[in-house]
Amino acid sequence: MEKWPTNEEAQKILEGWVINENLRKHAYAVKAAMEAYARKFNEDVEKWGVVGLLHDFDYEKYPDLIDHPFKGIEYLKEKEYSEELIEAILAHAEHTGRARDTNLKKAIFAVDELTGLIVAVALTRPTKKIADVEVKSVKKKWKEKAFAAGVNRKIIEQGAEELGVQLEEHIDIVLKAMQGIPEKLGL
């Protein structure tokens, strides 16, 4: 059996590498979205959640594309973690050149950017609460190119297509997952 970090071990890795609270919140958002997709595809919820939690754990220390996520991968290899975990983390970033040939790899690629857009939409609400965000509000802001300009909408669209879900359903799945953890997101 391949070695995977438990949720608790992954949390400790994240806390050991990431000080920035917003980057931690991003990890929690992606974890929740990955768990939602694991349930949708009848996969291992904890494993998928761990991928979400750890996909950017080296980003604070190594934010450039030369090192991220490769430095984190070196650490996971030293710990002798599963090749499936390593490949999934590599697949979240296009510049690694990893094939997204499993639902796990497709999901991490698809949800990563979308969580950022949803947070940005939540912050525009008068209440700044994720509970007040709807799919239609995300779709409305989607069309405003200047809004959350750093979010690559093409990647989100491509990710949804690779997963075989309509964009609206994809937004709904990720939004509902994030609405389930408002305290973790500070929203």
Image: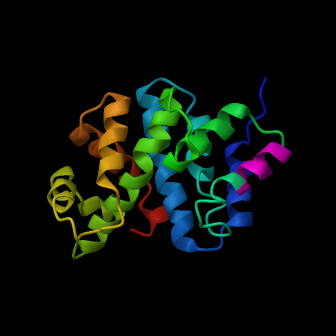
Q: Viewed as shown, does residue 165 lie left or right of 49? A: left
Q: What secondary structure do most residues of the magenta stretch adopt?
A: helix
Residue 176, image x and y in percent?
33, 47
Q: Is residue 182 magenta?
A: no
Residue 68 vertical position relative to residue 163 in the rendered view, above or below: below
Residue situated in front as seen by the camera: 173 or 55:
55
Q: Quick check: 18 left or right of 167?
A: right
Q: Position of residue 94 (x, y in %)?
A: 49, 46
Q: What residue sits 51% from the left and 71% below the top? A: 22
Color theme of the render: rainbow
Where does the magenta region start and end?
A: 71-78
Res 169 quadrant in image: top left
Position above or below: 104 against 62 = above
Closer to the camera in the image, 100 or 14 = 100
Q: Position of residue 30 (x, y in %)?
A: 48, 51
Count numbered badges in the picture.
0
Which image quarter holds the C terminus? bottom left
In this rendering, position of residue 157 left or right of residue 77: left
Residue placed at 59% from the left, 74% from the top? 20
- Where is residue 96? Give x, y as percent: 58, 46
Relative height, residue 107 to residue 1 (above, below):
below
Tell me what residue is drawn at x 65 percent, y 73 percent: 19
